[in-house]
Amino acid sequence: MERYRHLNTYLKEKFGERTLKIPVDGGFTCPNRDGKISKGGCIFCSQRGSGEHLKLKPIPVQVKEHLESYRGKRANKFIVYFQNFTNTYDTISNLKKKYDSSLIDEKIVGLDIATRPDCINQDVIKLLKTYKNKLDVTVELGLQTTNDYVAKLINRGYSLATFTKAVNMLNEARIDAVVHIMIGLPNETKEDIIKTTEYLNTLKISGIKIHSTYIVKDTILEKWYKEGKYEPITLDYYLENLLYVITHIDKNIVIHRITGDAPKELLVEPKWNMHKKWILNGLDKIMNEKNLFQGCKKI
Ligand code: SF4
């Protein structure tokens, strides 16, 4: 019995069979790194914009190699996931070229685009809508927190109002929105986790990704850690707050992730972050023992 709405189960229900993602590096940058908004980026953002495991090769090559690898034999349906940096941050014609170049096989049934809310506009929406006839289209937006003060601290570079506006635009276009949040940000309080969860319940979103805050080499957060300005969170703290989010979030929202994927060689702290099973099993254990379900404490 699943105590929260797992992505794999949701995709299986939606597409009638196991459906997996193909992560792709689209060769984008980010306005929060190229100087348009700032040069530093979000304080936790790694040099590869959260795509360390991806290799920057031509997009069709990345998709082809994935489909031909053992991972491509594990399912018959796939969703191309433009993962790292800001995948709507380019001219519309370049975006179209890049997205189109990924659609090289009949097995591809969906397009999943990770981006920033300030890089969603009507032209982008118009383009994304053109794929909806043939594909399932999802947009993933990094929110991290609803606390604008914490957002400033982490140098997110946009306000909550901008985020809300982007979600509304996606809703109007009937494009699924998936929201990324983080637990363990600097200066975060329990109240922030509560408010962020409550806020998510007011939105029309299809899914969330929950990440623990981890420190990666060569980031501003690493500098803060070395200067004693940031203390990494413990596994217990993460599990406690993760449990809060899961038990208070609407039961229809699909939980895409409850762990982050810090590359071993780049992870500074917390080391427990390398052990996905500790998080997955830890959460299952508490939910089983206490007989808790997703949304069971939602008011
Ligand atoms: S928006 Fe994403 S890619 Fe850009 S700096 Fe922040 S984490 Fe990095």
Image (cartoon, helix red, strand yellow):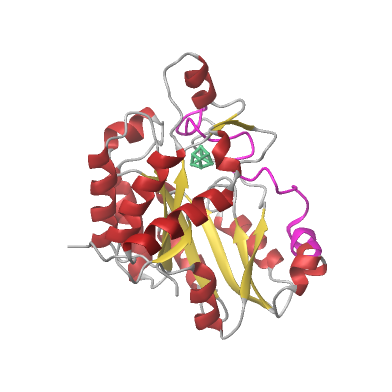
Residue 155 appears in view? yes
Q: Residue furthest left?
A: 299
Q: Front-most of 142 and 221?
A: 221
| Residue 105 sits in quarter | bottom right
Residue 1 in percent (x, y) is at 45, 75
Horizontal side, residue 280 vs residue 195: left or right: right
For the image shown, how many numbered marks are present on the structure? 0
Residue 44: in magenta span? yes
Main SS type for the magenta part?
loop
| Quarter of the figure that contains the C terminus | bottom left
Q: Residue furthest front?
A: 289
When the figure is inspected, residue 48 is found, relative to residue 205, above or below; the finding is above
Horizontal side, residue 3 vs residue 138: left or right: left
Q: Which residues are magenta?
A: 36-65
Residue 171 in percent (x, y) is at 34, 68
Q: Front-most of 34 and 286?
A: 286
Q: Front-most of 58 and 262?
A: 262
